[in-house]
Amino acid sequence: MGVSYKKLFKLLIDRGMKKKDLQEAADLSPAAVTKLAKDEYVRLDVLVRVCCALDVDIGDIMEVTKDE
């Protein structure tokens, strides 16, 4: 099983935001943003900060995927 943050990056595009804007709004490290971009696992507090910064629920920014 894995995770996908495609929803997050589509949301950023829809809002006219760049990864740097997200980093600043959610007070994320560059490493955390890189992990999100690579669909890697990140700590729950990172996801919570993203949700709070964008005023969305966790299901709006990520989904669990099944490996084939």
Image (tube, rainbow, N blue to C red):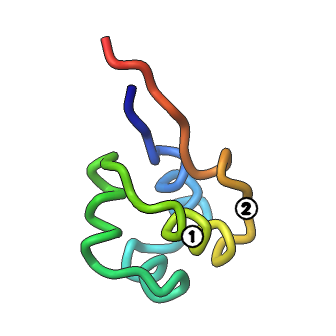
* Mark seen at residue 9: none
Dot placed on the residue nearer the N-terminal end, 1 or 2: 1
> Which residue is disc 1 drawn over?
50
Is residue 49 toward the left or the right of residue 52 in the image?
A: left
Report x, y in % for residue 4. Answer: 43, 40
Near mark 2 (Cα within 10 A), the count class, few <14, some 14-19 or many ≥20, is some
**Badge 1, how many Cα within 10 Å: few under 14, some, many 20+?**
many
Instruction: Indicate the secondary structure of the residue bearing disc 2.
Output: loop
> Which quadrant: the C terminus?
top left
Q: State the residue at coordinates (53%, 69%).
A: 45
Q: Position of residue 10 (x, y in %)?
A: 52, 51
In this view, the residue in front, 54 or 41, is: 41
Q: Determine whether, in the image, residue 34 is placed left or right of residue 18.
A: left
Which residue is pictured at 49% across the width and 69% down the height?
Answer: 46
Residue at the spot x=42%, y=19% of the render?
66
Q: What residue sits right under mark 2 in the picture? A: 56
Vertical side of 36 occupied by 62: above or below: above
Q: Is residue 29 found left or right of 66 in the rendered image?
A: left
Q: Count numbered badges in the picture.
A: 2
Label 1 secondary element: helix
* Three-letter amino acid code at the position of disc 1: Val
What is the quadrant of residue 25 in the picture?
bottom right
Q: Image quadrant of residue 16?
A: bottom right
Are the residues at dot 1 and dot 2 in contact (C-beta closer than 8 Å)? no
Q: Say which amino acid is labelled 2.
A: Val
Q: Which residue: 47% across, 87% down?
A: 27
From the top left corner, tell me how far across and down residue 60 is, in percent: 66, 49
Task: Please state the horizontal and vertical placement of residue 55, each as a whole percent of the image.
Answer: 74, 70
In this rendering, is residue 19 above or below 26?
Answer: above
| Image quarter (top left, top right, bottom left or bottom right) of the N terminus | top left
Q: Mark 1 and mark 2: span between their CA atoms? A: 8 Å
Q: Quadrant of residue 37?
A: bottom left
